[in-house]
Image (tube, grey):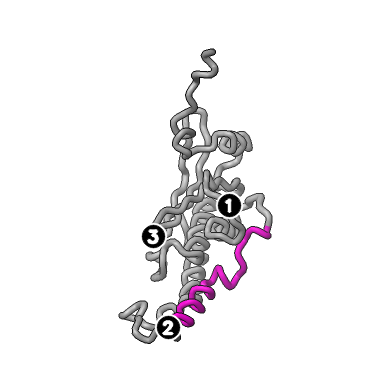
Amino acid sequence: MSALLRMPPRRRREGLTDYRKRLKLVKSGLPRLVIRRTNRYIIVQLTLSKPGGDNTVITVTSKELARYGWRGGFKNLPAAYLTGLLAGKKALAKGYERAIVDLGIQRPAYGSRLFAAVKGAVDAGLEIPVDEEVFPDEERLRGEHIKNYFEQLAGQVDKIQFNKSDPEFYSRLPEMFDEVKKKIEEVEVE
C-alpha cells in the first residue's frame, strides 16, 4: 500500500527533469554538453556528473558573442552555432576532448538552434557522438534565411525600418557571422 502513496520527485512532478534520460547520460561516464535556450539567450555548458552533484566546468552564453563583434540577435541559429563553437574551444583548452549531448526536456528537432550549437562544438574539435543529419545546413548557419526574410519583408512594407541606425544591417548578417567565426577560431581561449 505504501508504494501506491509514493510521490514522484518534485522536479519530475514539475516536468523539469526526465530522470530516465538523465541516468543514461550520467552512466555514459562522459562529460555532458548541456544546451539550454531561454527567451533571450543560448546557454552551452560542459558538466561533469559526480556522486555529490554535478560540476559545471564551462559556461558560455550567447551574450558573450558581443565581445567578438556580434551585433545580431542572441537567440537565433547563427548565434547558437557561434556559442557552441566558443564552448567547444573552451572545452578543448581545458583538456576535454569528448562529450555527450544533454538537451534536457527540450524536444529535439532536426536543424534547430540546439543542434546548431552542437555543430559549433563539433566544428571546434570536440568529439561528440551525433548523426550529421540533425545539423542545419550551412546557409542557415550563416544566417542567409534571416537575410532573405528581411529583404523580402522590406520589399513589401516601405514604412518599416527594422534597424533605424543601420537599415542594411540584416543584409550583412552572413558576413558578420563569418567575421565573428574567424575571430573565435583565432583567439586563444583559457
Q: Which mark is residue 63?
A: 3
Tag 3's secondary structure? Answer: helix
* Magenta-span inclusion, residue 136: yes
Q: Which residues are magenta?
A: 132-153
Percent coordinates x, y for residue 143 in the rendering: 51, 72
Asked if residue 66 lies in the magenta stretch, the reply is: no
Residues at badges 2 and 3 in contact (C-beta under 8 Å)?
no
Please tell me which residue is depicted at 55% across the width and 52% down the height of the picture. Answer: 92
Q: Position of residue 85 (x, y in %)?
A: 52, 60
> Residue 28, percent across and down?
63, 37
Magenta portion: prevailing SS class:
helix
* Secondary structure category for the residue under label 1: loop
- Where is mark 1, residue-wise? 108
Quadrant in which the C terminus is drawn: bottom left
The residue beneath circle 2 is 154
Q: Name the outermost residue toward the left.
A: 165
Give the amino acid at mark 1.
Pro
Q: Looking at the picture, tell me which residue is in the foreground, 4 or 94.
A: 4
Q: Quadrant of the N terminus?
A: top right
Between 51 and 90, the residue placed more toward the observer is 51
Q: Earlier in the sequence, mark 1 or mark 2?
A: 1
